[in-house]
Image: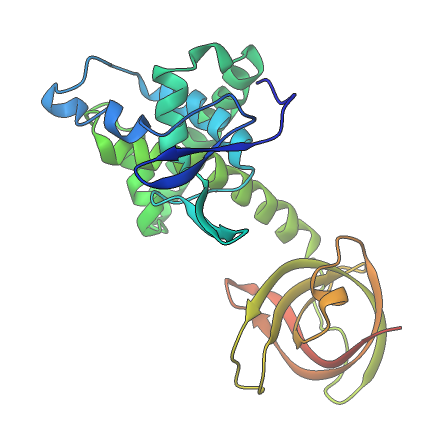
Amino acid sequence: MDTSKNHSYIEFNDTKVLKYFDKYDFTKSAETIIDVKQNNSPYSFTKEELLIASVVATKFNKTYVKSAGEYDIINGDFMKTAFSNKDILIGVLTKYPELITEEDRKEAGIIMKYLEDEFSFKILADTLTDFETSITKFLSPETEMNNSVFGIAAFIPTYYNNSVKNEVLRDRSTNDGHLGRIGEKVNTEIEILTSKYLADTQYGGSGYMINAITTDNHRVTFFTSNEDIANSKKNIKVSCKIKALGTAWNDENINETKINYVRIS
């Protein structure tokens, strides 16, 4: 991928849209493959090829972008600031196949092996989410190529990365107890895991809902209006007060402490 130039914008359908690194144009990707299943497309791809192209698409966007793309107002102009991972995936396969490297093939192979191993257990345990059910269809040799399969493939690298991060986090969340007793004041050091901005909250005004983990592996959650805390990429030493004791919303086997009055110490 040639990243030597900055992104630029070009006119397309009366809108300014992103041209990645002033070189890669995905404006017509959605039109390229109308419906593989109905043989309306001159292209034919294996699931392995879709996954490889999806790995490349993830490099363009860094994070997953849904099918509509992303838009913003820049200098007074309404612009498309990112194409969907699905559109980029299609563009890589049909317009820029030279972008695929051996490293991408290896990464896609690792992801495919992970899915095959992981889902054999999930299917037996009957613990699949709706999207995971769609992945099982993607993996099935009986599934024919169609537009929905392209959409599933586009999200799989993000799903894989999130799953691996969650496994690492689960392994770190080892404490049998909580951070302290209700009402106790505590000094600790935290790493921000997720930070979700809320424009209007039950606490009054705007702020951030934070999930974090302490350096001694206690999971904590809290609300704050402090942007320095919410957006920190480094560990922070904080003082706080124990509000409630419970478990993580997505895993009842992990203890989680709700804290408040969180201040940088």
Residue appearing at x 71%, y 73% in the figure? 178
Q: What's the coloring here?
A: rainbow
Residues 70 and 259: in front is 70
Q: Residue furthest right?
A: 265
Residue 52 percent location from the top left of the image: 44, 21
Quadrant for the N terminus in the image:
top right
- Is residue 180 depicted above or below 235 in this figure? below
Residue 17 percent location from the top left of the image: 42, 37
Quadrant for the C terminus in the image:
bottom right
Residue appearing at x 12%, y 18% in the figure? 39
In the displayed structure image, the side of residue 224 where residue 235 appears, left or right? right
Q: For residue 243, which quarter of the picture?
A: bottom right
In the displayed structure image, the side of residue 187 where residue 87 appears, left or right? left
Residue appearing at x 68%, y 76% in the figure? 225
Q: Residue furthest bottom?
A: 183
Q: For residue 253, which quarter of the picture?
A: bottom right
- Is residue 125 depicted above or below 158 in this figure? below
Residue 15 percent location from the top left of the image: 37, 42
